[in-house]
Amino acid sequence: MIKMIALMLAFCMSAIGVYAQKAPDFSGKWTLDVAKSKLGERNNIETQTLTVTQTANDIKVDTATKRTAPPAGAPGGGGGGGGRMGGGDGAATYMLDGKDVKSEVPGPGGNTVPVTTNSKVDGGKLVLSSSRTFTTPNGPITATSKETWELSSDGKTLTVITERTSPRGTDTTTKVFVKG
């Protein structure tokens, strides 16, 4: 009898551990609340939407951004979009198994750039990480990005904190999206 109770208790504890790491459901259409976001000085986002489709195995993020024109004489904006590990509009799919995925994306001069991405659930948050290495005349340059997605308790607000590190330094943004 004691063995049976111990076995049932062990099963329940393992089930709780698996449940605790289940990704919250980020599915839906999310609109950036620019006023509540901290975009940094190099971002020129006027509007941005994320359309998220999620299954038990992966999450697909389709990003659409409208940018403001930079002031006359100012360098072009940067900062990229939420959900696209490195910026830009379009669709990206991330596996939720915590394993590294290696791929190649278009890079400068028509070359391809190797990218390693990793997606995992950590403490009820979704963490999307990427690393890419560019070959330049001065040698290889590596840039990393880490996005941490967190839903509000009512599921109506998505906060995405992005930290990008490159030879230029580290840039952190906080984007607040509302479900709509």
Image (cartoon, rainbow, N blue to C red):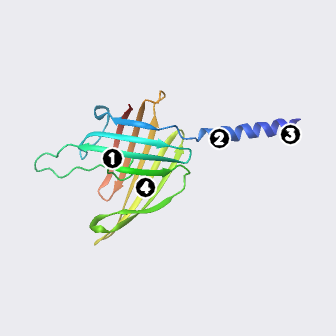
User: Which residue is the site of mark 1?
Assistant: 81
Q: Residue at the location (36% across, 51% down)?
A: 164
Q: Nearer the viewer, residue 96 or 147?
A: 96
Q: Amino acid at mark 3?
A: Lys
User: Which residue is the site of mark 2?
Assistant: 17
User: Which residue is the site of mark 4?
Assistant: 130
Q: Residues within 10 Å of mark 2 (few under 14, many from 20)?
A: few
Give the CA distance from mark 3 to mark 4. Answer: 46 Å
Q: Residues within 10 Å of mark 4 (few under 14, many from 20)?
A: many
The mark lying in front, picked from 1 and 3, is 1
First in sequence: mark 1 vs mark 2: 2
First in sequence: mark 1 vs mark 4: 1
Please say if the residues under marks 3 and 2 sit with CB atoms less than 8 Å apart. Answer: no
Q: Amino acid at mark 1?
A: Gly
> Which quarter of the rendering shows the N terminus?
top right
Q: Percent from the top left, x then y, of residue 116?
A: 45, 60
Q: Percent from the top left, x then y, of residue 64?
A: 32, 44
Q: Is residue 133 above or below residue 87?
A: below
Left or right of 165 on screen, residue 20? right
Give the CA distance from mark 1 to mark 4. Answer: 14 Å
